[in-house]
Image (cartoon, rainbow, N blue to C red):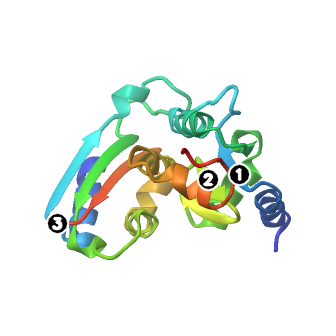
Amino acid sequence: MSDIKSHIQSQIDANPVMLFMKGTPQFPQCGFSAAVVQILDYVGVDYGSENVLASDELRQGIKEFSDWPTIPQLYVKGEFVGGCDIVREMFENGELKPFLAEKGLIQQDA
Amino acid sequence: MSVAETLKTKLEAGLSPTELEIEDQSYLHKGHAGAPEGGESHFRVRIVAAAFEGKTRLQRHKMVNEILAEELAGPVHALTMVTDTPS
């Protein structure tokens, strides 16, 4: 495994919810990344993040790693969940919270 | 052929959709980093196709990404998609 791929794998292993995004949660530099940040903050889950704009190697590497051509990319417990559209659809359809709760990452609503 | 026409041709050939909407949303991103002059960089597509039957959202998006791999590596900077089945 190349260095960048093992770096990505270690990030995914270390963070149960891991977001690869443009910018940072405080300063997203893309509307799609900002949307996922907003949703994750809203559901109240802790997550790790990495700014792909800080490294060309990471920006290319994550696309190959996930076999997914766009950023942002969300991983939950080592599993690739999807990009902005998928996260947004899961949220809007009320699937995201149960999905995270089932994995013990947030408290399920009573 | 414009980028939008290329997307349409490829998606029709690859998925035989019963409904296909392609919207150039580049105007929403005008002037931001990486947005080229003249638009055709940000698209929204809505695809209804029987080919999505029994597939998860992730699998459906991957099918579309594969069909449009060349465009996504080139002129298309962002692609928002809604994927549905006729049923």
CA gap between label 2 and label 1 equals 6 Å
* Kind of residue at disc 1: Met
Q: Which mark is residue A74?
A: 2
Q: Position of residue B84 (x, y in %)?
A: 26, 61
Q: Chain of mark 2?
A: A
Query: Where B7 falls versus A38 (above or below)?
Result: below
Query: Where A85 falls versus A44 (above or below)?
Result: below
Please name the residue shown 65% across and 57% down the image.
Answer: A75
Please name the residue shown 56% across and 60% down the image.
Answer: A81
Q: Which residue is mark 1?
A: A18
**SS for dot 3:** loop
Whether marks 2 and 1 lie on the same chain: yes
**Which quadrant would residue A64 be assigned to in this image?**
bottom right
The residue at the far left in this view is B18
Q: Nearer the viewer, residue A78 or B79?
A: A78
Please name the residue shown 39% across and 69% down the image.
Answer: B63
